[in-house]
Amino acid sequence: MLLLVSAVLSAQGLSERTYITTDRQVYVAGDRVWCSAFCLDAATGGFTDFSSIAYIELHSSSGLACTAKVALVKGRGATVMPLPSNLPTGNYKLLAYTAQDKNEENFDYSAFAKTISVFNPYSTARVAGGVEVVKEEPSRASAPVNTGVVTAAMPTEPHSSRSATIQLSSSKDATVSVSVWHDDGIAAPGQISIADFKSGIKPGTGFGRKAVPEYEGEIISGRVVGFSPAQIDSISGYYAFISTPGNSDNVYSAGVAKDGTLSFYTSNIYGNDDLVCEIENIDEYMPGHFELDSPFVDAPAGEIEPLKLFSGYADRIQKRGTASQIEKLFDSDTLFAALPHRPNLSFGAPAKTYILDDYTRFPTMDELIIEILAELRTRRRNGKTEIQVTLQDLHQGVHFADGATLVLLDGVPVFDHRKILSYDPALIKTVEIFPQVVGVGMRVFGGVVNFVTFKGNMPSMEFSQNVRIVDFQGPSLPVAFTCSGLQHSGNYPDYRQTAFWHPMLDIAAGEVLNLNVEIPAYTGRFVVTVEGLASDGSPIYARKEFYVNK
């Protein structure tokens, strides 16, 4: 809590500005937009280590189309935004902001937005007023001028190999995003460059208290619904919990405020997952539950230039649509290299784990605890049956917990321990026991035990009517798209549009990096773009082209 207070105080007057680079500028509906984030302190121009998450909104002139979150570490982060397959053809703006930006008076969300073009080859739908049909092929927008301390070198002669080596060098420490993509001649919309961004950012002039700054991770807010005012008053001070099935690290608590609001302070929950929402020890016959608020502001996007639709694009757009579909057939985690990210907090010391197939199987949970799980026992206290964990003190002594033990099934809290004791032990694969006092938010437990099933999704568990399981959108884990080891089967051609993507590449001063890029199995022009910042804050942009003719 002291860390949070310190963060809130230090946020006064801090203006954050977030710039997004993408792997390319032209997509088809259903594609993925790979994003790299640069979050700066507007006053100093350097990276800020304050906010731990940024929000991205994709807007057309018709409104909000889709969203994404990006986890930040020292001002840098990366995410991927899947485009809905029913997205209408048109130009879209990518807006990025942090929770701290919500507190800034008159914050311009669209000031440094990036514009991308999206074509939908599966539908005739177009953004209302956002498409202009033209008879002549649109001219290309001029690319930003190469600038900065990074140079990119590659073969200048027509290239016939299925791989290319890109050599990057820098005279100063630098952090950049690098993309290699196929240019099929569809004109991209005009862009601001990172140099424009750097020269245009200015500190804000006033701040309010609309949002709590997200220093340690995303703050997930919510409110209880379905309760009468008297019932809300009666559960004030109760603890609510959110958790994700299959991951015991993602357990967070929040106290129910007198007005029924909740705030879960997380260290970021990665990926799109189910989120189990429940209130501890609430009367299961109470009709209410709690719902989560959206962190997105649906910001005003400002004017968006119309997409110029040329009939000569038809074949190229159709090929891109086919490419998007076929690429999914070969999608593989082996193409992605995980990058460093802020880890979630766990329960401290490593768990003692029992693999139950290593022991004699027993038909009841009571027998399992008595015969195998020596660190557990069951007792009745205050009229309730409880599972308790043996705790270890600083002098290596052991005693059973006086306070409640946190009992989990596949990482999800089960506060009525009778439900675990009546559960079928044949469904349990392992048991993880954490024999120490554990704090989950402001709630303290005397030890933790996690029963992990073979399926990992709480099979056959029946929850009370107060529990809700909702879809949750978290930031995706940052990855580099390298295409190394790409394998194809059958007679499908290689239709990749993005051949290489690294969102957070660090280059040391004087270092020379050789990046090996697997080139798609077709001819044409390919573009390499490098964009980022040097250690002194100066902007970096480099663009090179090469051709594959065989």
Image (spheres, rainbow, N blue to C red):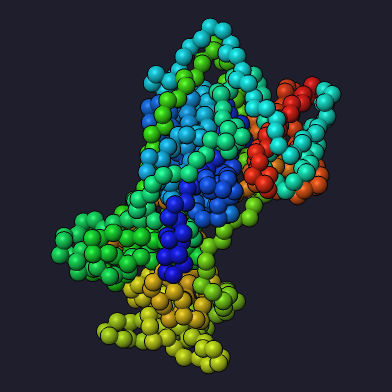
Q: Relative to 286, does residue 507 appear above or below in the rendering?
A: above
Is residue 382 shown left or right of residue 84? left
Q: Relative to 371, does residue 443 appear above or below in the rendering?
A: above
Q: Is residue 319 visible?
A: yes
At a point 81% along the width and 32% down the height, the residue shown is 154
Residue 228: image quadrant is bottom left
Instruction: Tell how many labels.
Output: 0
Is residue 346 shown left or right of residue 223? right
Residue 200, given in percent of the width and then of the height, sits at 53, 35
Task: Identify which residue, 318 or 207, lies in the foreground.
Answer: 207
Q: Relative to 69, does residue 280 appear above or below in the rendering?
A: below
Q: Quadrant of the C terminus?
A: top right
Task: Identify which residue, 461 or 217, lies in the foreground.
Answer: 217
Q: Is residue 55 visible?
A: no
Residue 414, given in percent of the width and then of the height, sits at 38, 70
Residue 201, given in percent of the width and then of the height, sits at 52, 39
At a point 64% along the width and 24% down the height, the residue shown is 143
Q: Residue at the top extreme? A: 135
Q: Relative to 464, does residue 374 appear above or below in the rendering?
A: below
Is residue 223 shown left or right of residue 363? left
At a point 48% along the width and 72% down the height, the residue shown is 450
Task: Identify which residue, 378 or 52, lies in the foreground.
Answer: 52
Is residue 6 shown left or right of residue 140? left
Residue 531, given in percent of the width and then of the height, sits at 66, 37
Q: Quadrant of the N terminus?
A: bottom left
At a point 48% along the width and 86% down the height, the residue shown is 390
